[in-house]
Amino acid sequence: MTSSSHQTWGGRFASAPARRVQAFTESVSFDQRLAEADIRGSIAHARMLAHIGVLTDQEFNTIADGLRRIDKRISAGDFEWRTALEDVHMNIESALTDDIGDLGKKLHTARSRNDQIATDIRLWLRESIDELAANLAHLRRTLINLAEREAHTIMPGLTHLQVAQPVTFGHHMLAWEAMLARDSERLAEVRARVNHLPLGAAALAGTTFAIDREMVARELGFEHVIDNSLDAVSDRDFAIDFANCASLIMTHLSRAAEEIVMWVAPASAFIELPDGYCTGSSIMPQKKNPDIAELIRGKTGRTNGHVVALLTLTKGQPLAYNRDNQEDKQTLFDLVDTVGASVVIFTDMVSNMQVNAENCRQAAKLGYATATDLADYLVRKDVAFRDAHRIVGNAVAHAISAECDLADLALTTLQQFSPAIESDVFDVLTLEGSVAARDHIGGTAPSQVLAAAHRARERLSAEAPAA
Ligand code: ARG
């Protein structure tokens, strides 16, 4: 190495990269986040090199001890990251050589930064997925608890944002839970595809050493060894997979957040959020705004953008590794951070919300939500559904001009619209009667909501806990 060239790859260079080039190409400012995974991968690699006789056992022990010391220094914040060394890999390798001497230079035998970085990201992402999965499970548990608590609370069910039919608040909570349950399932599928080992692919074609990739995979907990070396170092489809999954979680949270925003608005006031989960206005002293929900909705724009970023990053790349791939990291880190924080704070927010049952009920009562129940009633009295629909439409129009609910109309008035209507009609016109009548799997009857909450809880506890 000449003093003017790069410490690790400068042999064929007469001069070091220009300052601006260094600043442009470095990744250590962000990929230092992979340090722990990088060190774990290096120890597994070195152990395997000793196993196949490329290192002695003594050499392995010295290298592994040195790496562990560096790991401790990094977690203690006692490590100087140097931009001139480009990335996390070369910073750690260089620190190892400073610490244990020339032996440190043997560590990079039979590997490349190309298979090393692919391994690091997969290790890191696998752990991030496990953490996210646990937080998502906690959110689902919270929603199931809420569903049970509010199984009898009646609120307007909407289509086109118009009052459609009464539902229970608990039923609504279980709809959110169902979306997130599929997200948990997707996350587990993505984890399985992330959990493949690229190490051993070296730069792109494999290595001339008789490496034992299965041994490395076992130590690092990878389920499979990636078969093709060109593929192993180059594809980032696992990152795209995760991004899809993460942005779908955000999309689901965003829909729920939008409903929270509507529910806290004074016009509906279905729920109340504690002061600690709202923020105020700098000019309007009376304001209490649902900013957490709005921020979740807003951050979804960013996470959806990350999906497009990763797809576009990958689409033009010929085999095998290209430096473009370095751009996957900030995107992935931001996805993990944003989705993780959103899931946790959303859980806090909904577990602290108060449901105002009376306001919910009132809103359902205002919208002729039991009109379909009256039509169904007429069908049971042998009126064809289309005719029943028209009859009830006429009755609703009458109630609107009389400024009252269907249930407030006198029996004789109702009978003007159809002689099939009898005094038992009032049972189906109540909100409670309406929800109780939807008494089948997937229906909003309180008994069904409680049964569904029970099934959801069973499903949740049957899911494999994070490895
Ligand atoms: N910082 C690089 C990345 O994130 C590591 C691999 C660099 N490999 C190379 N041949 N320059 O992808």
Image (cartoon, rainbow, N blue to C red):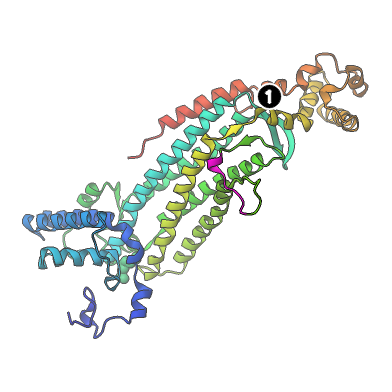
Answer whether residue 108 is visible to the viewer in this image: no
Q: In which quarter of the image is residue 271?
A: top right
Residue shown at 53% from the left, 57% from the top = 302
Vertical comparison of 307 with 438: above or below: below
- In front of the other: 92 or 187: 92
| Identity of the residue furthest to the right in this view | 416
Mark 1 CB within 8 Å of ligand 1: no
Residue 352 at what x, y percent from top left?
53, 35
Hey, what amino acid is under mark 1? Val
Vertical comparison of 326 with 48: above or below: below
**Ligand 1 position by quadrant:** bottom left
Residue 226 at what x, y percent from top left?
31, 55
Q: Is mark 1 on a helix, strand or loop?
A: helix
- Split into 4 quadrants, where in the image is the N terminus? bottom left
- In front of the other: 450 or 348: 348
- Split into 4 quadrants, where in the image is the C terminus? top left
Q: Give the range drawn in magenta.
A: 275-282
Answer whether residue 100 is visible to the viewer in this image: yes
Residue 173 at what x, y percent from top left?
57, 33
Mark 1 neighbour class, 10 Å CA radius: few under 14, some 14 to 19, many 20 or more:
many
- In front of the other: 244 or 156: 156
Q: Quadrant of residue 69?
A: bottom left
Vertical comparison of 28 with 51: above or below: below
| Identity of the residue furthest to the bottom in this view | 14
Residue shown at 53% from the left, 59% from the top = 305
Q: In which quarter of the image is residue 161?
A: top right
Q: Please tell me whether the stretch drawn in magenta is mainly helix, strand or loop.
A: loop
- Which residue is disc 1 drawn over? 435
- In the rendered structure, the answer to whether residue 136 lies left or right of residue 221 reads right
